[in-house]
Amino acid sequence: MTLSTEASPIGSAPGGKATSAPLLGGATEPTLFELSHAGRRSWSFRTSGIPEVPVHELVPEAHRRADPLPLPEVSERDLVAHFTRLSHRQFSVDLGAYPLGSCTMKYNPKVCDTVASLPGLASVHPGAPASLTQGWLELLVELEDALCEITGMAAATLQPAAGAAGELTGLLLMRAWHDEHGSTRTKVIIPDSAHGTNPASVTLGGYQVVTVPSDGRGCVDMDALRSVLDDDVAGIMLTNPNTLGLFEEDIAAIASAVHEVGGLLYYDGANLNAILGVVRPGDMGFDIVHMNLHKTFATPHGGGGPGAGPVAVSQRLVDFLPGPRPVRTDPAGGDPRYAWATPERSIGRVHSWHGNTLVLARALAYILANGGDGLRQVAETAVLNANWIRQRLSGTYDVPFDRPCMHEVVLSAQTLKETYGVRALDVAKRLLEEGFHAPTVYFPLIVDEALMIEPTETESPQTLLALAESLERIAYEASTHPEGWMAEYPHRTPVRRVDEARAARTLIPTDDDRP
Amino acid sequence: MPTYIPHTDQELASMLAFLGLSSVEELFSVVPEALRLQRGLELASGAGEPDVLAHMDDLAQANRARADRLICFAGGGAYDHETPSVTRALAGRSEFVTSYTPYQPEVAQGVLQAIFEYQTMVARLAGLPIANASLYDGGSAAVEAVNLGVAATGRATVWVSGGIHPHWRTMLTTFAAGTGHQIRTIPLQDGITRWPDTWDSGEPPGVVLVGYPNYLGCLENLEQARALCDETGALLVVAADPVAAGLLRSAGEWGADVVVGEGQAFGTALSFGGPYLGLFACARAHLRRLPGRLVGETVDVEGRRAYVTTLRAREQDIRREKASSNVCTNQTLMAVTAAIQLGWLGTSGLAEVARRCAQATRYTRQALLAVDGITAYADAPVVREFAISLPIPAETMIERMADAGFLAGIPLDESFDGGRQALLVAVTERRTRDEIDAYVTAMAKAVR
């Protein structure tokens, strides 16, 4: 294997890498508990002037804590230093490209941070009545309308806090629909390429999972699907484009086959970024759609959350949505007013309040900034970037399903593994030291040594080139270095490969368990 | 039009040429023509940042119930606590804000260690050895705890105290439609749960869920709840207020098997209800059923201390349909925020905030109960929140008080006896004597 030195038509620039970030050394950061010094403090409160009584008059003795709860005692200065140093030990989108397949780690516009910090949004109590929170209700209705237009659905609940919460909400809607029609069904179909949350949600929805295989082209095997369809099937959950980054071209046939046996179609919105303004789940025949606002609509992932997973439905399911829902009421001749209303046959409530509302506000700001035309460009560019990566790397890595992809591409390190003993995991760890986050590895499960790359639309051609060159260099190194060489990587990250087996075996889940 | 897409037209053309395509439309040739949207999305064209901010600010201005305009006496799981500049600044660091779930520990030690510190603090608050890396909110934590309890005991009957947050009770019923759990609400008497002397309907409960303090602010008798669980073999799940825990014996000390709670009070803004923070802690015996992520300490190949998500085999991406929970994305940023806030409070600060809340609550309650027409809704001891009965609908009271500059509280709902004429009032350490005195005066006027 040789390292490509071919000049690129888009020129060369060292974009997107985080390798210029200073690493001040390999020392461990002490925990906040280790930094604690008895008697030190940071806190201060308002001067209250409230006449006080002895504590025993406040809390009956039996309920009173004997000793104060031990927490770290640090100065504000030390608190800042500790968490700032921790932040320097963390990769992020703001630092560099994050081509983590299936996660849509696009740039998070800063204007949305400003929106989320507006006191008129951030300091509103969720239990305040509609009359005092008209702005929030209007915001939620505006977002719901936009999400329905984007997905081609009739109405949506904004309550689910994340994708998995949306899935379970959708399955409960499915159950309520069948119950209403006196139909007891026990099975939900999912493809073998599905995210793990799908089968887990199906179980919590009270259904049994029936898995259908993918065909040689990476799509749902239609014959296998038909063979499991009967009137015991409550519905099917699909991601389209699927987790291989491929569009399910037979979706119309799938929809009619499932509808024919009385089942409903659930759209997992994990990959919605690929189709914004191009094709809508509602027009494909889906009845229930969840969206991951923390993917498609650029709300930041926060190191693992918060997200938001609104669920949109077709007209026949609107009456089952969770409540209360924000609705517009138009008094005759007056300005629009907003109120809460619970649908007639509502499944109930899936959030303690109204959903992850500040995340919802960020998503609305993102939609307004892009507009309808801009959102379509988002999809176009995301798909273009992924296909460019696919084309560029197709001679270097295996491409299990070699046809145009959508917003992400699944490559494989199968040949590297067989020829040089270098696994997908080694490629991922080696890439970290190139200043890029790793792709998703070993998913979807149906591809051996999978490397799932989702560049997103916000990475420039120069960043794509730098990423591709790094991956090419890694493949070249695999061919020129002894087996095991790459397994030593990474060397310069804040820590090197960690002992996961030991973490499970010795289990130290808190500072109090440290030997 | 603003765009977050960096490509120039020339670059787009060059990339398409590299793919052998002549138009962007050809990228979507795999999408059947008949399905494609034949028009543009019916949304406004993209707007610049100033216009976006102006629109969002218009919406924000239309909210009267902002804590910077109406002095906040509302609680019920969402509280107006002090959040210092340092918590906002650190929690807003973009390394925490814009990173993903820590799947690559070599470049995610910042988030992983912050979660480890958070887990330690939550475990101590709960008085139990294990805490997870967070769940969506208090209600979802309660649902997960019930699922864990039913799986552990093999009994699907769940006794839920009527003193649990009414929204959480609705959530439990909503999700029970899928799991088949039998949710039975046990009514309150004088503000605390009146547990049945015997169980009459066949199966004894597999899970007992009670608040501490409960939704009305009252201190439940956890000794009795624990005895009930010992007698029936049920798991005791306590929904504990983590701020009150600064003064109270921990739920773990009372014998809780699982402790859940709403962690918004630790540095997260009121935010109209989200994103908040679901606290979850349990006894070691339930480790293998713990929902969500868990961070553990280990070492790297050079023997340096390192952190990593652990016991991963419990989770949905590995266990799939056999997983006990479907949670994936959680509320990590709020967990990191809570760790920062609890670091700011420290041992003395948490005790101080709990004590100040209790002092202010006592002072306010006493003054309100001296007002003609206002009576106690329940007599049981309270710590940081309480309910009062009014001669008028609580909603009317709230409207009148808004005109006087206060968010007076939140109404109890129909699930409580006389709920529509009862108001839940919370007084945090942010309320001063002057504010409280003015509030009581306004309440006395509004109640007439």
Image (spheres, coloured by chain):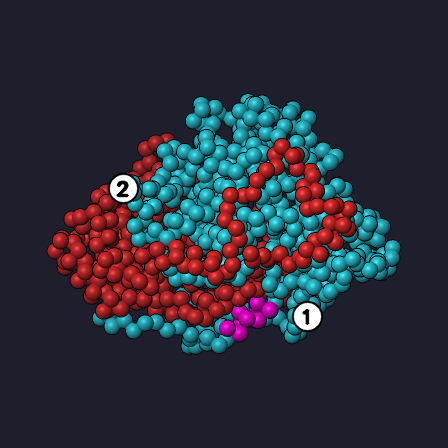
Chain colours: A cyan, B red
Going by the image, does A360 lie left or right of B401?
right
Secondary structure beneath label 2? loop
Going by the image, does A294 lie left or right of A5?
left
Label 2, residues with CA under 10 Å away: few <14, some 14-19, many ≥20: few
Disc 2 marks a residue whose amino acid type is Glu
Q: Main secondary structure of the magenta part?
A: helix
Q: Do labels 1 and 2 share a chain?
A: no
Q: Residue A419 bears which disc, if any?
A: none
Residue depicted at 28% across the width and 66% down the height: B431
Q: Residue B414 bears which disc, if any?
A: 2
Residue A191 spot, x, y in % from top left? 64, 35
Query: Which of the two discs, 1 and 2, sits closer to the camera?
Result: 1
Residue depicted at 65% across the width and 51% down the height: A381
Residue B242 spot, x, y in % from top left? 39, 59
Residue depicted at 59% across the width and 47% down the height: A376
Q: Do the residues labelled 1 and 2 touch (CB within 8 Å)?
A: no
Residue A360 spot, x, y in % from top left? 47, 51
